[in-house]
Amino acid sequence: MKICTSPVFVIAAPRSGTTALAWSLAKHPDFWNLGESQVLLDLFGNGELERNYERAATPGGSFLERSGVERAEFLGHLGLGLNALFTSCSGGRRWIDKTPANALIADVIAELFPGASFLHILRDGRQVVHSMLNFAALGSRTHLMSMTEPWMRDFRSACATWRRHVDAALRFEEIHPERCITIVHAQLAHDPAAGFERILSFLGAVSYDGPAEHFRTHLLNSSFEDDGFDPVERDRRHGATPWTEWSDDERAIFDEEAGEMLVTVPA
């Protein structure tokens, strides 16, 4: 059974640039982008792992309890199977999972994949909220309407979603600084060459120009490359300072839900 000993997880709040980062990194010959697996969230998110492990480990008869299987061993074996599946698709390259919400279960993923590294891409929360609320309206995403998330239509939910994901990712990095780094999107966009040099060094990969060049020449949110809008309209929807058009109520909601996080994260 072949597995990748050092996979990469790109984590963030939704609409933060995970797609652009993952596809750019995949321009390096050592990496392969599997996209958003979702399977880890389905299996282990929202407390499912704890509920199932605790149920299975109930004293008095469970297999795990009788066999003395600890949590780390249990997760390690589950991770091996998933790793083998992903590796079978990667052609032997290091695979990248870019599911943003994996930020919420990064601690579990770290146990599932002991050799994994994590890249947290951090984008200005005000830009993220703006992008969240415009996501479902774009023509190229109509096939996702059945998957509508609250943050696609509710301003307060979008603000809280950004804060919750960023907080989870930064807390994970604080506990595991050797396994996770935060990449500030504005800094990466300003100097992709330096940014990807840092990323590749952190991942222990050889220097290569392809990722920085791809990032430099592609849109922030590559989901919108075929959105049908002309460049002026696209810039308006994804501009640098969308909060200048917010109402007083919207500014107050953002300050309440995410203002403290905005002023404490790296600029």
Image: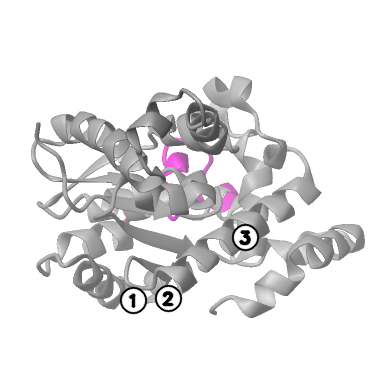
**Secondary structure beneath label 1:** loop
Q: Let me know if residue 226 is in the magenta part.
A: yes
Name the quarter where the C terminus is drawn.
bottom right
Residue that numbered label 1 is attached to: 191
**Secondary structure beneath label 3:** helix
What residue lies at 42% left-to-right and 51% top-to-bottom? 18
What residue lies at 87% left-to-right and 64% top-to-bottom? 252
Marks 1/2: CA–CA distance: 6 Å
- Which SS type dominates the magenta stretch? loop
Q: Let me know if residue 171 is in the magenta part.
A: no
Q: How is the image coloured?
A: one colour
**Secondary structure beneath label 2:** helix
The amino acid type, in three-letter code, at marker 1 is Asp
Q: Earlier in the sequence, mark 3 or mark 2?
A: 3
Q: Above or below — where is 80 with respect to 11?
A: above
The reply to whether discs 1 and 3 touch (Cβ–Cβ < 8 Å) is no
Residue that numbered label 3 is attached to: 127
The amino acid type, in three-letter code, at marker 3 is Gln
Residue that numbered label 2 is attached to: 187
Boundaries of the magenta span: 218-233
- Local crowd at mark 3 within 10 Å, few (<14), some, or many (≥20)? some
What residue lies at 23% left-to-right and 37% top-to-bottom? 80
Judge by depth and name the residue closer to the eye, 31 or 194: 31
The amino acid type, in three-letter code, at marker 2 is Gln
Percent x, y for residue 87? 17, 36
What residue lies at 42% left-to-right and 35% top-to-bottom? 40
The reply to whether discs 1 and 2 touch (Cβ–Cβ < 8 Å) is yes
Q: In this view, does 159 lie to the left or right of 59?
A: right
